Image (spheres, rainbow, N blue to C red):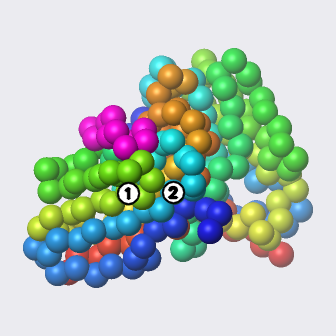
Amino acid sequence: GAGVSQSPRYKVAKRGQDVALRCDPISGHVSLFWYQQALGQGPEFLTYFQNEAQLDKSGLPSDRFFAERPEGSVSTLKIQRTQQEDSAVYLCASSPDSLGAEAFFGQGTRLTVV
Amino acid sequence: DQQVKQNSPSLSVQEGRISILNCDYTNSMFDYFLWYKKYPAEGPTFLISISSIKDKNEDGRFTVFLNKSAKHLSLHIVPSQPGDSAVYFCAARRSNDYKLSFGAGTTVTVRA
């Protein structure tokens, strides 16, 4: 496809379960971002990759959150031992340049922790 | 700490009239501003941007105005169309940074 693709679209996890969220960015895009959007709020920055290098993970809320992009294309956001406060929409975005000026967003993964 | 604020959670406007969406920011280091539009179950889509060296940028029916001294920007949609019904997010960053700070969004409903 031409756009950023995320899977799954919806995920329900029991508290304490590990989850993995996948992002397929636009082919050739250098920059990849993960954002977390809580209900009624705007997206909040989690982490940034330039190719395969994770240059910024300052927004990850705890050490239960881990992201990787091993070959500089597909990225996975992993959340270990999920908690109810992790319930949110997780958005992935990619950009052709290193500043991500006009990033293209995927449709997001809605995670509900019960 | 919300550095970008959209104080109106919703806006209802009649088709054909002007929609004005407002956004305030607190970080004086921000010098690049964007508006994103989001339909339900879709990701945000880039709409229009403005650099701090300008005070106005226009693209078709969409115009963004920037008032740096007031740390305020606004998005004007003229004329409003039913397809404009969506959530609009204001975002900001420093020109040498990649990290976007978003407002909470304004839901626009265009009435026929």
Q: Chain of mark 1?
A: A
Is label 2 on the same chain as label 1? yes
Disc 1 element = strand
Q: CA distance from mark 2 to mark 1?
A: 8 Å
User: Which residue is denoted by mark 2 in the rendering?
Assistant: A25
First-in-chain label (2 vs 1):
2
Name the chief secondary structure element in magenta: strand
Task: Kindly check if marks 2 and 1 are in contact, taking CB atoms under 8 A apart as contact.
Answer: yes
| SS under mark 2 | loop
Does A56 appear in magenta? yes
Q: Quadrant of the N terminus of chain B?
A: top left
Q: Is residue B10 visible?
A: no
Q: Amino acid at mark 1?
A: Ser
Q: As displayed, is residue B52 above or below residue B109?
A: above
Tag 2: amino acid: Pro
Of all residues, the one furthest to the front in this rendering is A71
Relative image position of residue A24 (x, y in whole percent):
48, 62
How many residues crowd around disc 2 within 10 Å: few (fewer than 14), some, or many (20 or more)? Answer: many
Task: Tell whether B39 sits left or right of B18.
Answer: left
Q: Which residue is mark 1?
A: A75
Expressed as whole percent of the image width and height from the top left, the position of residue A59 reads 29, 43
Q: Nearer the viewer, residue A23 or A10?
A: A23
Q: Residue at x 21, y 55 (%)?
A: A65
